[in-house]
Image (spheres, helix red, strand yellow):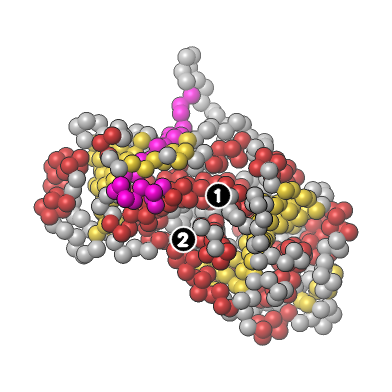
Amino acid sequence: MFPRLGYLKYFAYLQGHAPMKLMQFNVEVSVSINEINADGMMLVLPVDATPGPKLDALLGKLPVWLKADFSTVARKRKFEAKAGSSLSFDAPDGTRKSLVCVDAKAGAFELLVAARKVMDSGVFDAKVKRLAIDLTHAGLKTQEFADAFVSAAAAKIYKFPKYKTETKTLAKGEKPAKDEQQSLRLCLVVHKSEVKSVEAVVARATDVTTAGTNLVRWLAKRAGNDLTCKNYIDYLKRLSRDRKWGFKLHGHDALTKMKAGAFLAVVKGSAHKDYGIVEITYAPKGKSTKHLALVGKGLTFDTGGHSLKASAYMLGMNGDMAGSAVALAILNIASLEKWPVKVTAYLAIADNMIGPLAYKPSDVIVSMKGTTIEIIDTDAEGRMVLADTLHYAAKSKPTLMMDFATLTGACVRAIGTTYSGVFTNRESLHADLIKAGKLSGERVWPFPMDKDFAECLESTVADLKQCREKGGVDHIEAAQFLMHFAGDETPWVHVDLSAIEHPGGLAHVATDENGFGVRFATTFIREQLGIK
Ligand SMILES: [Zn+2]
């Protein structure tokens, strides 16, 4: 049994909100569907031929609990068993029974999409509080199906508590309506020999979704005047104290001493001094030889500065801290799962505002590394705060360094919002990056990093230009800029999170803000650092 209530705890620490409604998510693994006493029962059937089996042949395959009731309904509704089709109905005993046909050849991404659609269909609504998923017909796909359905359910149960006030006045004695689906108990039914492996898959899927993906969604959705730099840093501090992580804030004075001129240029327009590089450390029990550094862009709001964004592009810029949330979420999972490696998150928490003191195009600043940078566009602030943060993180000589940032519009134009772009100083990692994307269902694609892409960053007045004036391939050129500060001693991967917002949701997540990156990165890191 795996009761994972991961994110409940984190919600409780968020400030400026009415108390959260608690949502429970509980998953068990069982070998017999008859002992579960569920009000929803679903059979998942892989279908590998088109067209699928004829109804009579299909009926022959079905387990006893479904067969009798299903036969009448299926004939009436002219059900065809093909990949993507499903049938749900209320059986005479009051249980919601369903058959879901899934493409036997589907990869992780397609499976997550299929599972999300199932969770949004009649299989799962307010009436169903305990859903049994029969995977005994899944064959070799059992683990992948378990991962997809548990992940989709955990993503579905999450609800962003809105800022709307309650307007309904309650009659005397009337209780406030309960939020739909505040709790869900899932029970996966598998063969006895599969229990152990499926339990492990379930635990991982639950952790990654509730304590990772949902945490990113929660943070990235908060309004800019709610998740301010100060509130964000306070939250990180309290979370670190609770989880017994090391916490260090390199605030204004420390950054000045560290000569973090690139970071400090961006925050010159801020009316406060609550920004900083937050350094959070998870250290495993016992000695660890490996060290993972995670760097995140945490712009709680990005106006563009003097190179002001047009209003349509400024809308939603409270989500420009999503990269830092992804880095935090990965460290959170490492801590929950007790990874045997040291993990440090370096979160660049800042905002990019306008004002009389704000930095300007054509300014020249000196970065922490000592590199002078000619400012071209104040809206290219992400690479500025990351330059100093990457340089600082690289000094600790980690085994692997990854950074996450909603960095460029060019990446969105190059690859869209269903993939994210990856860039690395080790071309030999390309195959592993693609593989981790495919296996996790959060897909990435590497871009080339040949040296000549950096020629456009040559400046006549400084060591480096921040970016070019117009044209070019800004996603690659931004990565070239970052590579200057990340150095080449440490294997480094930069993730430009173009997929973190996708209209209508992505993979297992149904909301635009989808927490992209946690599944991909944890899969990649586990492989690279040999974490079981
Ligand atoms: Zn910007």
In the image, which residues are magenta? Answer: 176-199
Q: How many marks?
A: 2
Locate residue 185: give its quadrant: top left
Task: Tell me, yes or no, whether the highlighted magenta stretch contains residue 193.
Answer: yes
From the viewer's side, name the closer residue of 73 and 472. 73
Q: Is residue 46 left or right of residue 448?
A: left
Picture coordinates of residue 216 (x, y %)? 58, 50
* Residue that extends furthest to the left in the rendered view of this protein: 56
Residue 349 seen by the camera: no
Residue 1 among those drawn in magenta: no
Q: Residue at x 85, y 61 (%)?
A: 258
Residue 241 pos. (x, y %): 70, 41
**Ligand 1 within 8 Å, label 2 CB:** no
Amino acid marked by disc 2: Ser
Disc 2 to disc 1: CB gap under 8 Å: no
Q: Nearer the N terminus, badge 2 or badge 1?
A: 1
Q: Which residue is identified by label 2? A: 440
Identify the mark at residue 337; answer none if there is no mark: 1
In the rendered structure, the answer to whether residue 9 lies left or right of residue 381 reads: left
Measure the alpha-carbon separation of dots 2 and 1: 18 Å
User: Dot 2 lies on which element?
Assistant: helix
